[in-house]
Amino acid sequence: MKTTIASLKARQIWDSRGRPTVEAEVTLAGGAVGRAIAPAGASRGAHEAVDLRDGGERFGGMGVDGAVAAINETLAKLLVGQDAADQSAIDAAIIASDNTPNKARHGANATVSLSMAVLHAAAAAEGLPLWRYLAGEADVRLPLPEIQIFGGGAHAGRRTDIQDFMIMTPHAGSVRRALEITADVYRAAGEVMAGRGQLSGTADEGGWWPNFNSNEEALVAMVESIEKAGYRPGVDVYISLDVAANELFEDGSYRLPLDNATMDSGAMVDRVSRWAATYPILSIEDPVSQDDMAGMADATKRLGETIQMIGDDFLVTNAARVDRAAAEGACNAALIKVNQAGTVSEAKAALDAARAQGWATIVSARSGETEDLTIAHLSTGWDAGQLKVGSFARSERMAKWNELLRIEEAMGSRARFAGIDAFPASVAAHLKASRA
Ligand code: PGA
Ligand code: ZN
């Protein structure tokens, strides 16, 4: 069979933070080759699949010799001879071989690179771009981009407590136009920072380094940047936040050093709600920490009719956690990071679970990335509706946006931009009404 796995191997390469990562390469009997690279998070959830790192002195303990060996020595033996076109069987074999709840034996860096490489090989064997292979004959939408302007939290020495200050352009009509608007706002934000004497380069995902004296000052600068670029905040361009509140949670309290505040969950939700009432915020990720179900349910109840409430560390791309959160009324959207789950099939199951709840879905990069383009194809081919990659600078980010442009072009007259419909129904309805 042309899709039988003939050989596979892994190698150590390097990510956007100059840290080692794993690249897997799969060759099929028919000659098709698939390759994929594991990304790496910095603000990780406790419940996500874990990377296997060598520890010790070398590369600050970040070495991936063990993960590379897991593929070359163990998983290769298991998968050679199997059918790459049967992704769920491949992933089931990887999961069974790992046999831990969080990929601790082989490492999620090994399993995710291998799982995605198999998927790429299967698509290549059909001579199809990955997005089309995944979509089949169905018409799928190009995702609405969520793009960072200021990058804080764990990606910028904790210069701001909030991690991502992003923009969304649901009315842009196309990826091409969404990226043009983003380019204008990103450039304007740089000028705003320069004007304040606060321009000092970029953070891990390419957003401007956030030299602010309070979290709210960053929100003010977001509005100023949108206006300076010639757009109407809350009409043409909306703000999206990733609070990444896990990183703020310690000993039962939320600490926001920049605001000189220590709060319980209720007060944290109050604060986020106040920001939402004051600024044109359309989407909020992880407003509370990963195990604060009551806080997330409270935040969703208070804001979820008009604002997309995303679980990232809160859901860790896990179908069971999606179902549990939904039962409690927590979240109305799920971030989908394949390496949080560890295989393509498990990530897809989390996406399907979220969709079954009527939630929105956002395929996402990690803060440690590479030239790997898989997520541009997954977000489109799975019809996820949204894509989060980081900012509008640094080629590990731009590579994904540029790939979306190529996909949009390839779709030609069939191209459809997810736009407003990318959001949960109530949020989309509110957006439509406010436009009318
Ligand atoms: P990461 O965080 O550093 O774990 O990739 C990105 C995010 O919180 O969305
Ligand atoms: Zn996040």
Image (cartoon, rainbow, N blue to C red):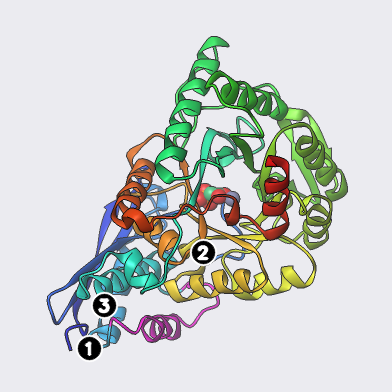
Q: Quadrant of residue 381?
A: bottom left
Q: Position of residue 182 (x, y in %)?
A: 47, 33
- Closer to the camera, 235 or 159? 235
Q: Position of residue 231 (x, y in %)?
A: 57, 26
Give the CA separation, mark 1 to mark 2: 27 Å
Give the CA separation, mark 3 to mark 1: 15 Å
Q: Earlier in the sequence, mark 1 or mark 2?
A: 1
Classify mark 3: helix, strand or loop: helix
Residues under numbered marks 1 and 2 in contact, where contact means CB atoms less than 8 Å apart: no
Circle 2 sits on which residue?
340
Horizontal arrangement in the rendering, residue 391 relative to residue 221 (left or right): left
Circle 3 sits on which residue?
73
Give the CA separation, mark 2 to mark 3: 23 Å
Q: Which residue is located at x 64 percent, y 76 percent? A: 320
Q: Which residue is located at x 24 percent, y 68 percent? A: 34
Q: Is residue 85 magenta?
A: yes
Q: Which residue is located at x 43 percent, y 38 percent? A: 177
Whether residue 42 is situated above or below residue 350 in the rendered picture = above
Classify mark 1: helix, strand or loop: loop
Q: Earlier in the sequence, mark 3 or mark 1?
A: 3
Give the crowd class for mark 1: few <14, some 14-19, many >=20 residues within 10 Å: some
Horizontal arrangement in the rendering, residue 190 relative to residue 112 (left or right): right
Q: Position of residue 236 (x, y in %)?
A: 59, 34
Give the crowd class for mark 2: few <14, some 14-19, many >=20 residues within 10 Å: many
Circle 1 sits on which residue?
81
Q: Which residue is located at x 18 percent, y 89 percent? A: 1
The part of the chain drawn in magenta is 84-104
Horizontal arrangement in the rendering, residue 430 relative to residue 268 (left or right): left
- Name the kind of residue labelled 1 in the image: Gly
- Name the kind of residue labelled 2 in the image: Gln
Res 79 visible: yes
